[in-house]
Amino acid sequence: MTPTRRHFLAASAAAATTVTAVTAAPPPESHFRKRQGTKFACNVEMWFSKEKDFLKRLEGAAALGFPGVEIWPYEGKDVAAVADTCERLKLTIAQFTAWGFKPGMNDPKNKRKVVDKIGEACEVAKKWKCGMMCVVAGDDIPGVSQEKMHDTVIETLKAAAPVAEKAGVMLILEPMNIRVDHKGHCLYGSAPALKIVKAVGSKAVKINWDLYHMHITEGDLCGHLREGFAADAIGYVQLADHPGRHEPGTGEINYTRVFKELKKLKYAGWVGCECTPETDEATAAKAVFAADEW
């Protein structure tokens, strides 16, 4: 009999003490990996944040039954050790950050730096067997219009796209929100992100569609998702509830409704859990998977 979500929830409760000690070995065949529901990737930068040993964070994610993880910068991490650990734990690295907030991709003087960095990051992606890398547009530049900054992002991504295409990696551009978390960022909301991706015109450049940021910026999550999929512009999806940026069920977003919509839209990709557990990781994981129950 194929284990159900209900089996997973029971297993998570039993594994709570194991998760507290993230060094404990995960079950070789977790219930979650056998589920037919949404593929969730645990953000091991926000989850297990008190654990200083990054490799133990990966162990914690596996112990909870996550089949995948997402990582922020690769710089400062032991790339080979992360690769070996994920291989041992049968974890997929769903995506990691190739280009962050600073220096801004929206500044023409950084174009060459971005392209070179994407090339370097593609080598990491190969070692990590990872098919997606997040890129960030950058914060506002004093005296420069948003339209001009977005034009620069387009030109920079056009230059970087062939590098990603050759490596078989997708660059996922992430719009933020400026009401709560990223005041002064130059890219927020789905409309300008869709415009940028369309202008770049590469299958290797799509949107990191963070539902948390989209909810705060524009609402109507399901309606905007339909527009994004109609444009074939969504490469990856992330979640967090609002307010608080915790797991589903702690705020005002009806994630069960959103997951139903994603299924209706035939999205079979990863959903990154880029949120901070409100109390503990085991409880947060149960809430994530419970929201996918209907």
Image (cartoon, rainbow, N blue to C red):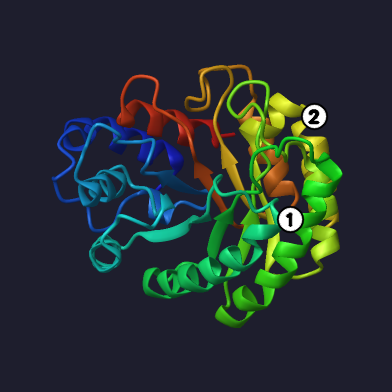
Residue 140, numbered circle: none
Residue 96, horizontal then vertical, whole percent:
47, 56
Q: Name the secondary structure under disc 2.
A: loop
Residue highlighted by disc 2? 220
Q: What is the crowding at mark 2: few (fewer than 14 residues within 10 Å), some, or many (at least 20)? A: few
- Count of numbered marks: 2
Residue 218, horizontal then vertical, whole percent:
78, 28
Residue 204, horizontal then vertical, whole percent:
68, 69
The relative height of residue 180 versus residue 118 in the rendered view (above or below) is above
Residue highlighted by disc 1? 153
The amino acid on which the numbered mark 2 sits, given as a three-letter code, is: Asp
State the CA–CA distance, disc 2 to disc 1. Answer: 26 Å
Q: Please tell me which residue is depicted at 52% across the width and 53% down the height of the picture.
A: 36
Q: Quadrant of the C terminus?
A: top right
The amino acid on which the numbered mark 1 sits, given as a three-letter code, is: Val
Q: Please tell me which residue is depicted at 69% across the width and 25% down the height of the picture.
A: 216
Q: Name the secondary structure under disc 1.
A: helix
Which residue ends up furthest to the bottom in the rendered image? 166
Rendered image quadrant of residue 101:
top right
